[in-house]
């Protein structure tokens, strides 16, 4: 019985991870189109925004996806979404 419970818990965790990954991928796509950043920088931007706003990465990704569908972004998130690509580009070698 304990093994079955463990497997169910693991299954729930894997489902949640898969759903989170899909949202993050969608947000990277939105950043690529609307923010005109390379896809390879998308995750870095999301991570930096998450760290600077103290909002979980998945929640940042969800807001970005909603924004891509026409919703407004909260001011703090909007400011960080503008600042993060600039910080990232500035640290890239020329």
Image: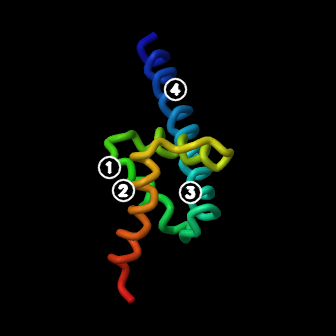
Q: Would you say the residues marked 3 and 2 are in contact, meaning their CB atoms lie under 8 Å apart?
A: no
Which colour assignment does the render follow? rainbow
**Residue labelled with disc 1:** 51
Label 3 Cα neighbours within 10 Å, binned few <14 / some 14-19 / many ≥20 = many
**Relative to 74, is 39 on the left or the right?**
right
Label 1 Cα neighbours within 10 Å, binned few <14 / some 14-19 / many ≥20 = few
Q: Residue at x 54, y 41 (%)?
A: 62
Q: Would you say the residues marked 3 and 4 are in contact, meaning their CB atoms lie under 8 Å apart?
A: no
CA–CA distance in space, label 3 to label 4 = 24 Å
Q: Is residue 1 above or below residue 32?
A: above
**Relative to 16, is 47 on the left or the right?**
left
Location of residue 63 in the rendering, given as x and y in whole percent from the top left corner: 53, 42
- Mark 4 secondary-structure assignment: helix
Location of residue 92 in the rendering, given as x and y in whole percent from the top left corner: 37, 79
Q: Would you say the residues marked 1 and 2 are in contact, meaning their CB atoms lie under 8 Å apart?
A: yes
CA–CA distance in space, label 4 to label 2 = 27 Å
**Residue labelled with disc 3:** 28
Label 2 Cα neighbours within 10 Å, binned few <14 / some 14-19 / many ≥20 = many
- Mark 3 secondary-structure assignment: helix
Q: Which mark is residue 48?
A: 2
Label 4 Cα neighbours within 10 Å, binned few <14 / some 14-19 / many ≥20 = few
Looking at the image, is mark 3 or mark 1 earlier in the sequence? Answer: 3
**Residue labelled with disc 4:** 12
């Amino acid at each position: 019985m304990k093994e079955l419970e463990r497997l169910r818990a693991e299954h729930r965790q894997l489902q949640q991870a898969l759903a989170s990954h899909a949202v993050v991928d969608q947000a990277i796509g939105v950043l690529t189109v609307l923010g005109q950043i390379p896809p390879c920088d998308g995750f870095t931007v999301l991570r930096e925004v998450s760290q600077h706003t103290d909002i979980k990465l998945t929640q940042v990704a969800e807001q970005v996806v909603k924004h891509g569908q026409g919703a407004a972004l909260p001011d703090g998130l909007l400011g960080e979404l503008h600042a993060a690509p600039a910080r990232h580009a500035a640290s890239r070698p020329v």
